[in-house]
Every structure is written in C-alpha cells, then in structure tokens.
Image (cartoon, helix red, strand yellow):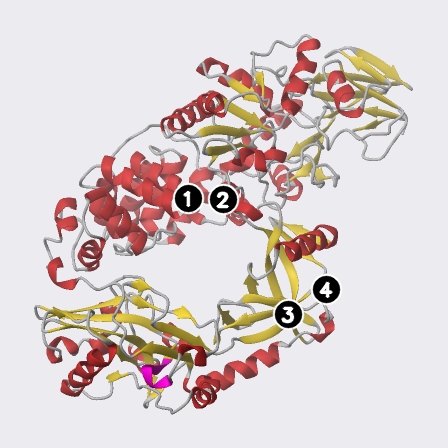
Amino acid sequence: MQGDFYIDPWKPVKLAVTTHGHADHVKWGNDAYLCHELTKPILLHRLGAELNIQTLRYKEKITINGVKLSMFPAGHVIGSAQIRLEYKGEVCVISGDYKVEYDGISTAFEPIKCHTFVSESTFGLPIYKWLPQQVIFDQIGNWVNNNQEQGKTSVLIAYSLGKAQRLINGLSKTDRQIYVHQSIANLNDAFIQAGVALPETIRISPEIRKEELQKGLVIVPPALADGRWIKTLQQAATGVCSGWMQVRAGRRWRSADAGFALSDHADWPGLLSAIKATEAEKVFVTHGFTATFSKYLNEIGIEAEEVKTQYGTEEDEIEIGAPGKPEIKEEAD
Amino acid sequence: MKRFTELIAQLETSNKTNDKIAALVRYFNEANDLDKPYVIAMFTGKRPRRPVSTALIKEWAIELSELPPWLFAESYHSVGDLSETIALILPPPARTTDLPLHQWINALGDLNGKDDESKKDFIVNAWDSLDIQERFIFNKLISGNFRIGVSNKMLVNALAKQSHTESNKIMHSIMGKWKPDEISYQELIEGAHVDTDRSWPYPFCLAYALDSRPDSLGDIKDWQAEWKWDGIRGQIVKRGGELFIWSRGEELVTDQFPELHFLADELEDGTVLDGEILSVKEGKVQSFSVLQQRLNRKTISKGQLEMAPIAFYCYDLLELQGIDQRGKALNIRRKALIEIIKSIKTQGTVVLSPTVEVGSWEELALLRADSRLNNSEGLMLKKLDSLYHSGRKRGDWWKWKINPYTVDTVMIYAQKGSGRRANFYTDYTFAVRDGEQLITIAKAYSGLTDQEIKEVDAFVKKNAIEKFGPVRTVKPELVFEIAFEGIAESKRHKAGLALRFPRIARWRKDKKATEINTLDDLRQLLNSTL
C-alpha cells in the first residue's frame, strides 16, 4: 500500500486511478480521480461537474508517494489506459479493459514490458476470435441495405461509450445518415469539445420523421433495446454489436434480428499476444474466464493466477448478451 | 453452400413463423435447383448415413486447433453445440470455395466405406476452405442433425407459397418415397412420384368450449353426446386404392400407424372418415401419455407396437363413394358411418366412437364427471341436424370438457417474456416438494392478469438469488396453482414425470411454500392414470 491509491475501486477511496469511463470501472464518491485527459469529459458527464480530477497524457509520468505512475493506451475506448506502476525497479502494469486491434478512434493498444501484468479475460476462450473490423462493418452495411429494401428501419444496439463512436466512425463511409440516441449524442458532444474528431451524426428527436430514420441508420444504447420507442419505428430490425454475438446461443439470447461480433475487448489470440509481449514473469487474470485462462497460461509456461473482482458482476455495464449476464442497463438515462 | 448458410442464419434469428416462411420462400426462389430437394430432405428428417463418427471429428478438430483437450471441453461447455465449437476453434480457413450444397452432401456420402485417413483428408480440407458459419453447416451436414425449428407444416406452407401449389398436395408429395439425387425440385413440387390428386383431406370441423350451462342449449333430444377422446384427431382418406392418414395439423402421418394400413384393402375407394387416433389395449382407451410414445417416430419397434397399439375411433363420415357428405345433417352422416364400420372385416381396430345415451342434461353431467375413468377429456355435444363445417363455428358443436387437474407449486425461476411483456418477468418455472428439495415440475407463462404480472415482476426483481443466464432464481415463496390436462413419465425431466398443457390457474396468495404438493402426490396421480 505504498502508493495509497486504488485503481478502478468499487468502494470510495481517497484517490481513484481510473482506467476508462465505463460504469463498472468508475464509481461515484471518491475524493479525487486520476485519469487520461480524454476520460475526464466522460467522468464529468457521468458523475457531475464537481469532481476533483487530475489528468495525464499517455506516457506522461507522475510520482505518488514514491511510486512512479504512467498511462499507456489500452485501445479499449477513447481515453482508456493501462496503468504502469514502478517502485524500486519493480514494474507492474494493470491493463484495465483492452483490445489489440486498432479501432480507428481509440489510441492503439501498446504493449509494455513489465514484471507483473494484470490482464482482463472477458473473452478468454479460444472460441472468441474476431474478424477484422472492416469485415464486420461490411456485414453491417449489407444488413442495412437489405433492411432498406424490405422497408425496415435498421437499429444498432451499442454502448454509448466506445462501441457507438467506433460504429459511427466505421460506418460513416456508407453514406447513410446516422441517427443517435441522446445518451450517445451527449457523449459525442463531450468528446468533440475535448478535441476528438467524430463524423457528423443527428441527435434523435421527436421532430425527426420515421421515414427519415428508415432511410438512415439508428444507434441506441442497450437500455433501449427492449423498450417501447423501437416499436414506434417503421418495422425496426435490431442488430446487436457485441463479442458475445460470436456464439449462436449469445445471438439467440438476445431477441435481436441480427448479431455482429464486434467487441472492444481482446479476443483469444489478442490476449495471448498482448501477454507475451509484456514478457511478464507473473500474470494476474481478472474479470472473465479467469480460471480457464490462467490454467492455460500456466500450461504454456506463463505463471498466472486468477484474481476475483467485481467488474462486470453488476447489471449496469457488461457486454451485451453475455451468457449468464443478460441484463443490460447501461446508464440511468 | 453460401446461400444455404444464409438461410439457416435467417431461420435462426427469428422466432416469427411468418419471417421463417418468408426466408424459406426467398431461398427456394433463389437457390440452386439441384440443392433444393436436398434441403427438403434434410428438413423433413430424411437423413443420409453418417459418414464419420463424432469421436473422430472431435479428435481431428482438437489436433488442428492445437488446444489441450480440457480447453476444447471448456469451449464446448460454453458454446453448447459440438458442430459450432469446432467451427469456432479451428484456425481461420486458408481458402474459400463455394461448392453447391448438393455436391457437399454427395461428397460426404461418398466417404462411406473409405478408410479413416481419406476421410480425415477430406474433412480437414473442407474445414480449411469454409468460413465459420459454413463450417458450422458443414459439421451439421456430417451429423445430419439439423434442429432449427422448421416443422414439416412450415416447410410445406413455404413451398406452397413459392410454387403456387396447394399445400396438401405438397405435403403428400414430400411425405412420399423419393431420393434427393433422383428427383428434381419441379417434380417434387408437382408430385411426379405420387398421385397427389387422391390424397387431399377436408378441413376439420372444430368446436368451441361450452361457456354456459348445457341446458341453455335446449332439448337434449336435439343433441348427440360423445366422449371427447384425448388422442390425435385424424382423417382417414381412401381413394384410388391408396390410404392416407392426416393429422389435425394437416400432416400426413400414414407411416406412423401401420395398425390402420389394412383399411387400404377394407375401405371402399372414395371414403373419408373423421375420428381420433388412440392407443387402445384390450378394448380400453389408454391415456395420451401412452399414445405419445408412438408419435413422430421415423421407425416403430416391435416393443412400441405392443406397448401402445393403435386404434381409430370414428366420429364422422365426410365422403362416401367419392361424394362429399358434409352438407348432410349429422344424424344422416352417422347412419351411413355405422354401415361403413359394419362393413369393415377386421374387428376392433377401427370402431364407431360411441354416443352417450341419456334422457336429461343432469344425467349427462353425472356421466361427464367420470370422464377420466375412460381416459376421455369430457364430452362433445353436437347438434343432430348440424352440417360438417369447415373450421370453427359457434352453435352446432361444443366441447364440454371436465375441469383440469391442479397442483399447488412454488415459483423458483423467472424469465422475461417477449413482445408486449418483454420488460416483465412473465415466464415462470414451478416446483413441488421432494423431501427437503424442490424439484421442477412445470414451466408456464399464461394465466395471470397484468396487475398480477407486475406484482410478480417486482417480487422477482427484489428476490433474485442467483443470476443464471436470462433466468432469475428467486426465493421460493410465491405459491401458484397449476392446472394441467395429463401426466406422463418422462426421462427428460428431473422429476421423472411431465405435465401436459400446464398453465397458471391462480396465484394462491393464501398459501405458503410449505403447503405445496409433493412429488409423491404427482407420482400417485401418474400411477392412477396409467
């Protein structure tokens, strides 16, 4: 406890070092927050303007009670960071959530050499291997075209933070007008103010005619997936964008019309390559398939141990359609 | 193969019958003509011989993926389907191919009799040229086991729509004997291998449930009362020397009931009978659960023939000497029916469903109370001058069923509903007591008012113990009375028995979870109905 700070704490503490802005990693009530400069607008938006927030740029170093701390891009969502800690020559890196594929909008993941690496394992099974994101965007594009022909309105279900911006960026080339729910629009505004370049979208409002929405592409957060609003659209076809859509059971779990395996977490090969690149002597495996993944790491000669965390156990910020975690309430808006 | 893969994906992503039919119609409009008979064969359960064992397929997949077997097992556990697990864990394909579906199926068929090394070569090569979805389909082709929620009836409706042909003709055609490599799609639709002009059935005349006192129907002398048998409503058609048995769902089930095949010789051409397919032993009608062992089987063993012998109880005569009888009054049709039954030489298998002769409604009510003694569900009341209507029409025919069985249970799981009820926990699983344990006995989702649903929903949200999948385990506290129509032994259910048509009768707010029924209570009921 040399540093006297906590990373993504789930109980209020004096200083919360925050890897990224998803609700299962940020709790209200800490005395102070330390995060990447692009996570700050998210915290302000989500937790209120009265926060004591200190920010870092990637690779900028500070020292807290003798512990050197710096942040490196995690590639998970805009502003997401791995936390590098160094104390008396020992280096430990806490990955937070990460993915290794560059998504075009979050700063690309960078592996950091360390003695100890704490890795997530959300998709730590060999059945999870993502296709390149362009392939998925093309699939979505075809799906939207088919919907259009059949007079259906295309509604993509995606998290307000991360997945939504990734889709907006990836699908802006399809020349369809993208309409976003206000929770997404609010975050987009916050990002744009902070200097992030985002393609233009239209905030959904009651004045927009349903015929226009039918011709375009609608993105809403998971909380609206089963709501009444979607039923008011012209023949809504819903498409869930989540890593869990890789498996048929995951697709069936959600009563969506289509599932696209697009995730902001590393897939199986991604986890393995990231861990190997750290050259860590010891790996701690957190949220996800912790037991399975750490057992496998030990078998291939990487010393690993599982850590039990509370991330993702709550019903408010987990990937859509996760078997065993079907409740999706992203935020209270 | 790509087009078929797309079809499967579309069938899997919708629960709506209309969407599925639309997807099938599009497929049969667009697909390779040579593929179509294979798809029809597959969906109707005509399975080719399995060319490679599951064990070998699994072994090769593990080898190629370079994973430890325990990790393969973990993955399988998470996916829940072997074909899909293999499709997902294999390394990405090196090539792409788009061979038509029928060529894949024939190539798999050609593997029969080859040595394991050649089989492995073929399978591994195939895996390396198919994407994940296609691999999944390919693995399913090997097992021949497609369970994708397409019933014969749904397929037939789609084919009928696509080809503008009458659905009964298509049902007859595809239920006939044919091989996908010997018949064209066009021939199959036209029924070139069978004579579809003979088989067509009449729409069944159906009855509404009686919702008032029977004496409100007037003089009992104007009515015919019969037992309402608890079997499969069926129509027997004999034309042009051929016999056809249709079920109420308009599926052709002739092959399932060899006991009735003698009618091909003993019924006159141009005869159509309406009646109930039942299991009858030593003159006694058996419960539905006995009959159930005989339903939807591709082959019937000698043991099954002995355990559940079939008989046909005739209700009505729809065609006589090729002439439609439905416009005649019931009492006239009945007289002719009696003559036909008399003319059948083989005794005891095809019989007249007896009428219940009484002088007053009160007397009839007394007899009805004992319906379960002869394994019937109550009585049918038919007006003596009624015509044989197409479908359901109020007034002439009534079902007067006995009250269902009931059991008091406690709710242990809840799941969200769909459609209008998507935001509420509306699908519940109920348990009875077995010693110290609670054991699941039924799932039901109807029978509560919107207000009650809201109350239960609030309870579930507050009292969820464990969150497993979309299902919430809740504190066993709420007691519900479940009504059901019958009870049968079941190896598939933990309780060892299954309830037929379970539904919520009422929420017993007056009862505590300690007061519910026990598994023994239900076992006793089971023993008394067998």
Mark 1 / mark 3, whichever is N-terminal: 1
User: Looking at the image, which is closer to me, B170 or B329?
Assistant: B329
- Do discs 4 and 2 belong to a common subunit? no
Badge 2 is on which residue?
A252
Queried whether the magenta region covers residue B225, the answer comes back as yes
| Subunit that carries the residue with mark 4 | B
CB-based contact (under 8 Å), mark 1 and mark 3: no
Q: Position of residue A312 (x, y in %)?
A: 69, 38
Chain of the residue under label 3: B
Q: CA distance from mark 2 to mark 3?
A: 29 Å
Residue at the spot of label 1: B12
Binning the other alpha carbons within 10 Å of mark 1 as few (below 14), some (14 to 19) or many (20 upward) gives some
Residue A284 to residue B223: above or below: above
> Which amino acid type is shown beneath numbered disc 4?
Glu
Amino acid type of disc 3? Thr
Q: Position of residue A195 (x, y in %)?
A: 68, 7
Rendered location of residue A270, percent (x, y): 57, 27
Task: Please name the residue shown 58% across and 22% down the image.
Answer: A204
Mark 2: which amino acid?
Answer: Arg
Disc 4 target residue: B477
Q: Which residues are magenta?
A: B220-227
Mark 1 and mark 4 on one chain: yes
Q: Which mark is residue B409?
A: 3
Mark 3 residue crowding within 10 angstroms, few (<14) / some (14–19) / many (20+): many
Q: Looking at the rendering, in which quadrant would you find the N terminus of chain B? A: top left
Across and down, in percent, residue B42 comes to 28, 51
Residue at the extreme left of the image, as rendered: B240
